[in-house]
């Protein structure tokens, strides 16, 4: 079965990702990972993450995907040995010095080649296979025809980006951030200069932008499975738990439906609606169908919207009073309608007829993020279920 | 240490040139294998540095299969397909690892040395001290960009065509600059997509001595978008500098170039990048 691979920026997100149906998660440590300014995982956290993953029969991959400078080399061996000891399922690598280190130090870790290496063709894939790389994450510039050909001719274990933000340039072949902000893009400091707004030559009403829309391949799940792609990757180690739960849940349903012969247009449309709603930018299939055009980009500044659909998370059930205990995330009030979606894929429509505070005083609304409130419910729903606005 | 010129200008005294190979490079100064005959007394380096897709591979293999007949000093490659095919075909022409922004440490140089690669063009975004440390810890032939506008990014997208289509204007100009906070960055679009250049011209003349002492074998001077007369003047200064490496003179030469090209600087040679911006 094809793997659904999700990002996790911390232990809470990791647990949510697994609960909502990710088969595997990728994380970054405090060092050597390309999201240097995310929370990231300490070694102790990685150890815990590995235990959580394996207890849930899931996989854990650790990104060691910076492009190393001389000063980064010291300490790498110790770090890799710790990952070996924690039995992480693979490391994600872009700089081949990591391969040398594994070999010299006889460290037994499986290696996935990061998209940062921009692998775009079957010859490069063959090269990396000859270096005992177990999986190759293809560049996002590769089309479906090329993916098919690569798999057919190399038999490689191929991972493809499924959903999320895109780089404007080839990954690894962009240091705009270094020149504009002195932040090293290939060591995790990317300042996302490709989302800045410019003038081209002169001032015009429409600014020059090189920003791209996001990637969505929900329509192509059947093709991706049929072409023998091994893993489908969701982008976004810095995304929220609500985003992760929604996106993973949608793709879990679509993948399972295809294997169960229940993949229908109606289901696809429903899940796409949710995916579009949770995104903060528009999405397209980008390079999957071939070349991109002006329609895959943005020109009018940042067209990003913050999403306030996430109302709360179920953190328990008050048996005595038959109430769901909810941690609030966005404002809701009496009379609002909402949907609870659970890690196992169930959806329940509810209306906030009565809202209570922790001491069971009835309140009109929940207005403070992280505030604990209770609502009447005869039905017990799983912990970590999410509540979103009904739309 | 020798100077390699990445230029189409006629530099009679130059001993070594760097061109992009037609249809397989990201360079603006592309040349076909047949045109190399014009440079028979010169050392020629060829860049085969575009990101390759499956459709490019048969042509790439055809070119590589005959490359040994052309007396080329080195092929600067980006995509690993070039290395993979060259190994399979047992190509004798030396390969030079030239992955613009990825050549930043000695240990990866040593990895590629074991792959029978002969040298590396170091990234322009590392410091002079990092260059020295790389030289100290590798037997590779080291190439350093010393002069010219530096590429900052490559996209497969046609980011000029798309924009002009969107605003419904004819793209009548070939020189385009992306402007932000008073700085201008050249944008070039070609067959392979779009390429972005630095706003300042790299001029590392004051470090020529340190580079030579470190064992750097070649320095690369790029004439892209610099007028012929100015470039020739600058190249004369560099040639003089190579024959007289006193620090005092080098600072004088740097000053001369600054007068010719006020927007020149040492870029990252003495400016270290950061990547963690908040304390954990």
Image (cartoon, helix red, strand yellow):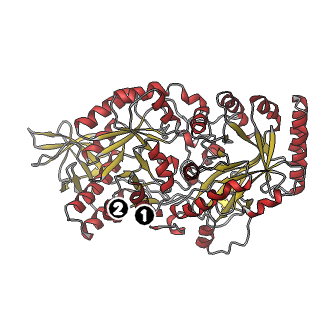
| Element type at mark 2 | loop
**Pointer 1 and pointer 2: residues touching (CB < 8 Å)?**
yes
Estimate the x, y position of residue B160 in percent, counting from the top left: 64, 65
Where the C terminus of chain A falls, by quadrant? bottom left
Dot 1 or dot 2: first in sequence order is 1
**Residue at 34% over, 48% down:** A5
Mark 1 lies on residue? A144
Position of B253 compared to A304: left or right? right
Q: Is residue A330 visible?
A: no
Mark 2 lies on residue? A227
Q: Where on the picture, by quarter, is residue B138?
A: top right
- The label number, if any, that marks residue B41 in the structure image: none
Q: Is residue A108 visible?
A: yes
Position of B234 compared to A184: left or right? right
**Residue at 56% over, 58% down:** B52
| Element type at mark 1 | helix
Report the Cα–Cα distance between label 1 and label 2: 9 Å
Is label 1 on the same chain as label 2? yes
Q: Which is more toward the observer, A295 or A254?
A: A254
Estimate the x, y position of residue A13 in percent, counting from the top left: 33, 41
Chain for numbered disc 2:
A
Instruction: Give the answer, above or below, for where B239 lies relative to A120.
Output: above
Q: Which is more toward the observer, A43 or A318?
A: A43
Estimate the x, y position of residue A16 in percent, counting from the top left: 28, 43
Q: Which is more toward the observer, A387 or B142?
A: B142
Chain for numbered disc 1:
A
Position of A9 compared to B75: left or right? left
């Amino acid at each position: 079965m094809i793997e659904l691979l999700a990002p996790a920026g911390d232990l809470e997100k990791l647990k949510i990702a697994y609960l909502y149906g990710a088969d595997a998660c990728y994380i970054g440590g405090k060092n050597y990972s390309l999201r240097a300014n995310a929370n990231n995982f300490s070694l102790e956290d990685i150890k815990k993450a590995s235990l959580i993953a394996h207890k849930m029969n899931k996989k854990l991959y650790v990104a060691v995907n910076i492009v190393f400078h001389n000063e980064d080399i010291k300490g790498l061996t110790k770090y890799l040995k710790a990952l070996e000891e924690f039995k992480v399922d693979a490391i994600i690598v872009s700089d081949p010095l990591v391969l040398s280190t594994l070999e010299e130090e006889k460290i037994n870790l499986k290696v996935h080649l990061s998209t940062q290496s921009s692998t775009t063709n079957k010859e490069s894939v063959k090269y990396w296979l000859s270096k005992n790389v177990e999986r190759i994450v293809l560049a996002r510039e590769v089309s479906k025809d090329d993916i098919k050909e690569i798999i057919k001719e190399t038999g490689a274990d191929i991972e493809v980006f499924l959903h999320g933000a895109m780089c404007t340039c080839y990954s690894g072949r962009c240091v705009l951030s270094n020149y504009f902000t002195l932040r090293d893009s290939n060591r995790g400091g990317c300042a996302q200069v490709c989302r800045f707004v410019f003038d081209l030559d002169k001032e015009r009403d429409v600014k020059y932008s090189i920003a791209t829309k996001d990637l969505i391949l929900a329509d192509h799940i059947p093709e991706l499975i049929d072409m023998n792609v091994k893993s489908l990757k969701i982008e976004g180690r810095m995304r929220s738990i609500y985003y992760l739960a929604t996106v993973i849940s949608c793709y879990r349903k679509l993948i399972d439906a295809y294997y169960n012969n229940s993949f229908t247009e109606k289901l696809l449309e429903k899940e796409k609606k949710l995916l579009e709603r949770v995104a903060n930018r528009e999405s397209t299939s980008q390079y999957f169908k071939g070349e991109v055009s002006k329609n895959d980009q943005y020109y009018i500044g940042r067209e990003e919207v913050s999403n306030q659909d996430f109302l709360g998370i179920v953190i328990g059930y008050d048996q005595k009073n038959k109430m769901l205990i909810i941690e609030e995330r966005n404002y809701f009030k009496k009379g609002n309608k909402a949907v609870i979606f659970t890690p196992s894929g169930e959806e329940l429509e509810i209306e906030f007829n009565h809202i209570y505070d922790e001491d069971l005083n009835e309140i009109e609304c929940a207005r403070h993020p992280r505030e604990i409130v209770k609502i009447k419910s005869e039905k017990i729903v799983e912990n970590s279920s999410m509540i979103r606005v009904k739309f | 240490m020798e100077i390699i010129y990445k230029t189409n200008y006629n530099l009679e005294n130059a001993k070594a040139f760097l061109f992009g190979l037609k249809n397989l490079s990201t360079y603006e100064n592309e040349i076909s294998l047949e045109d190399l005959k014009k440079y028979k007394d010169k050392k020629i380096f060829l860049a085969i540095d575009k990101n390759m897709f499956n459709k490019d591979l048969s042509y790439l293999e055809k070119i590589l299969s005959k490359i040994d007949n052309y007396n080329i000093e080195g092929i600067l490659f980006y995509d690993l397909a070039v290395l993979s095919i060259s190994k399979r075909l047992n190509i004798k022409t030396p390969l030079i690892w030239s992955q613009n922004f990825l050549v930043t440490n000695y240990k990866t140089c040593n990895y590629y040395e074991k792959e029978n690669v002969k040298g590396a063009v170091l990234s322009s975004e590392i410091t002079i001290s990092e260059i020295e440390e790389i030289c100290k810890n590798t037997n590779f032939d080291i190439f350093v960009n010393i002069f010219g506008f530096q590429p900052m990014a490559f996209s497969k997208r046609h980011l000029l065509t798309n924009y002009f289509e969107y605003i419904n204007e004819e793209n009548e100009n070939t020189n385009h600059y992306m402007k932000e906070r008073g700085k201008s960055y050249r944008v070039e679009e070609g067959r392979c997509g779009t390429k972005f250049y630095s706003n300042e011209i790299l001029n590392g003349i004051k470090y020529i001595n340190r580079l030579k002492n470190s064992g750097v074998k070649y320095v690369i001077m790029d004439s892209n978008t610099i007028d012929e007369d100015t470039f020739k003047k600058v190249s004369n200064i560099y040639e003089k500098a190579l024959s007289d490496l006193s620090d005092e003179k080098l600072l004088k030469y740097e000053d001369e170039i600054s007068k010719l090209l006020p927007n020149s600087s040492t870029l990252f040679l003495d400016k270290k990048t950061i990547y963690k911006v908040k304390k954990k």
